[in-house]
Image (cartoon, rainbow, N blue to C red):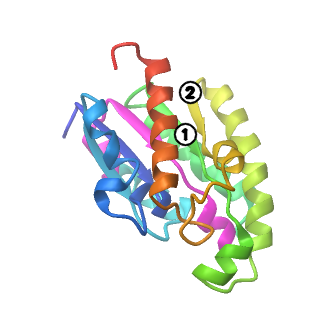
Amino acid sequence: MQKNSFVFIGDSLTYGYGVNKNNNWVESLNPFIPLDIINKGINGNTTTDMLNRFTEDVISYSPKKIFIMGGTNDFLSNRSLDSVLDNLELMLKEALTITKDVIIGIPPIIIKEDAYRLFMQSSTYDYCEKQLQLLGKSIIELCNKYTVTYVNFYSLTFKFSSNNIFIDGIHLNNNGQNLLLNEFKQLLKNMDSTL
């Protein structure tokens, strides 16, 4: 039990696939946050995977703050928007039994042409691209319903997509990691003037 912790649960976008651990946006928050950062991102996880391990990997720490982000792998596996939202809502409701300081991440865009060429060939990139756009709007509605904060990495990465921020069209390089880091730091400053 680490009551002075900030747990981040997600997939490879939280874990920091493809970059040195020290350059991952979550790990890079350490000097700026007076809490123990616990990165529970797992490569390839869907929101169902995250939900299945949520009690052990998040709730068991009784954290002060919780970050949740997922959905990209669900859509790459042809799963529905409703199933992603249901899983996110279940995690959010459980998180709120521990703390009111919950942040939901809206996942970054994908660049399907680069993903097909550089990551792997897949028939689901078109579907994933469309669903991620819809997911962002739905997450904002979900966060408004429960009065929790969200960080919109989708609109951020869309805005800067021409700035060489991806390794392979899905995962972020060091430039992309810094982009997410700075956005999240600003969000935390706006939420808590003591940071």
| Image spot of residue 163 (x, y percent) | 63, 54
- Which residue is drawn at the image coordinates 77% and 52% (left, top)? 133
| Image spot of residue 167 (x, y percent) | 53, 69
Name the quadrant of the N terminus. top left
Which residue is tagged 2? Answer: 148
- Which residue is drawn at the image coordinates 60% and 45% (left, top)? 153
Which residue is tagged 1? Answer: 104
| Image spot of residue 120 (x, y percent) | 61, 84
| Image quadrant where residue 74 sits | bottom right
> Which circle's residue, 2 or 1, is located before the other in the chain?
1
Along the viewing direction, whichever of 93 and 150 lies nearer the viewer? 150
Residue 44 sits inside the magenta stretch: no
**In screen coordinates, is 164 left or right of 141?**
left
User: Contact (CB < 8 A) between labels 2 and 1?
Assistant: yes
Q: Is residue 13 above or below residue 45?
A: above
- The answer to whether one can see residue 78 in this image is no
Q: Is residue 186 above or below residue 6?
A: above
State the mark number for residue 83: none
Name the quadrant of the C terminus. top left
Along the viewing direction, whichever of 10 and 162 lies nearer the viewer? 162
Q: Which stretch appears magenta? A: 56-77
Which secondary structure, mark 2? loop
| Image spot of residue 84 (x, y percent) | 65, 56
Classed neighbour count for the residue bearing mark 1: other residues with Cα under 10 Å, few (<14), some (14–19), many (≥20): many
Q: Amino acid at mark 1?
A: Ile
- Which residue is drawn at the image coordinates 57% and 63% (left, top)? 166
| Image quadrant where residue 137 sits | top right
Q: CA distance from mark 2 to mark 1?
A: 8 Å
- The answer to whether one can see residue 61 in this image is yes
Q: Is residue 64 above or below residue 78?
A: above
- Which residue is drawn at the image coordinates 58% and 34% (left, top)? 150
